Image: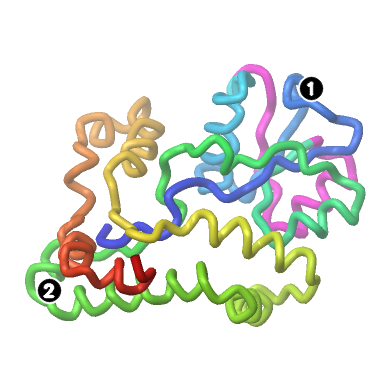
Amino acid sequence: MIVGVVPTFVDHIVSLSSITKVEQLKGTTGGVNRLGTTSDLGLRLALRKLGVDPEKDVKIIPTGGTAERFAALSKGLTQFTIIPEPFLTQAEKLGFRNLFNISDLKIPFWWNGILTRESIVKAKRPLMLKLARVMIEAMHIIKTEKEYAKSLFKKNLGVSDPEGLERAYKDYANAFPEVPYPTPDGVKTLLDDLAPKNPKAAAADAKAFVDMSLVGELDKSGFIKQLYRR
């Protein structure tokens, strides 16, 4: 990874309206996209942080995409799920509860980032530096040009609800770091999750999966400070 874009989970635990506290999830069933995906990992890690054992206290099943997860809740197949903005507003309009904002836990995890091979960074460093620079500029635009950012969300996510777009902007703008070093702690979270069933993950060094030199070069040059005029 050469640029860290979203350093934590920007998802929410959504439940039936009858569930008002996280503790009430015990004994219920939760839905995720597919087992082993980011939604599955995010939900399990969040539950564990909140005092609910994802292996013993609840049952987690694959239910599909956002629409399918809503359908599973409506049919009573599940009692809670994990959903990112801008779909939370839709969930609330369907009568479901925004039970908990997982981003508040600040679990180290690269929900989004730019990855490439180490050999490519070495062979095409000037090009990779340009890529990192453009990405940092794009993140700056998202963080500082609110209405333009919301227009991009509307176009690319197919969401037109003003409240949903506003809340999505808040979640993502807050999540994007100004200086996006791809720190190893977010990789370690994934390796730790894989370790019990994967000896290679257990033996792996998280630092081997990140290259902070590109962002570091741009940071030291003053480019990022100039963007934010500090």
Circle 2 Cα neighbour tier, 10 Å, few/some/many (<14 / 14–19 / ≥20): few
Which residue appears at 17% of the width and 63% of the height?
220
Q: What is the basis of the colouring in this image?
A: rainbow
Q: CA distance from mark 1 to mark 2?
A: 51 Å
Where on the picture, by quarter, is residue 133? bottom left
Q: Which mark is residue 125?
A: 2
Residue type, label 2: Arg
> Magenta stretch: residue 97 in it?
no
Q: Residue at x 90, y 54 (%)?
A: 94
- Mark 2 residue element: helix
Contact (CB < 8 A) between labels 1 and 2? no
Direction from residue 63 to residue 186 in the image, left or right: left
Residue 20 coordinates in the image, percent (x, y): 84, 29
Tell me if residue 130 comes above or below residue 121 in the rendering.
below
In the rendered image, the residue lying farthest to the front is: 230
Q: Is residue 215 left or right of residue 173?
A: left
Q: Nearer the viewer, residue 96 or 59?
A: 96
Residue in the image at 82% along x and 59% along y: 90
* Residue type highlighted by circle 1: Gln
The image shows residue 88 at horizontal and vertical percentages of 75, 54
Compared with residue 32, is residue 122 higher up or lower down, i.e. above or below?
below
Q: Nearer the viewer, residue 224 or 126?
A: 224
The quadrant the N terminus occupies is bottom left
* Residue that extends furthest to the left in the rendered view of this protein: 123
For the magenta stretch, what is the residue range? 56-79
The residue sitting at 36% across, 71% down in the picture is: 229
Toward which corner of the image does residue 66 lie, by quadrant? bottom right
- According to the image, label 1 marks what residue? 24
Left or right: 224, with 24 as reference point: left
Residue 212 placement (x, y as % from top left): 20, 55
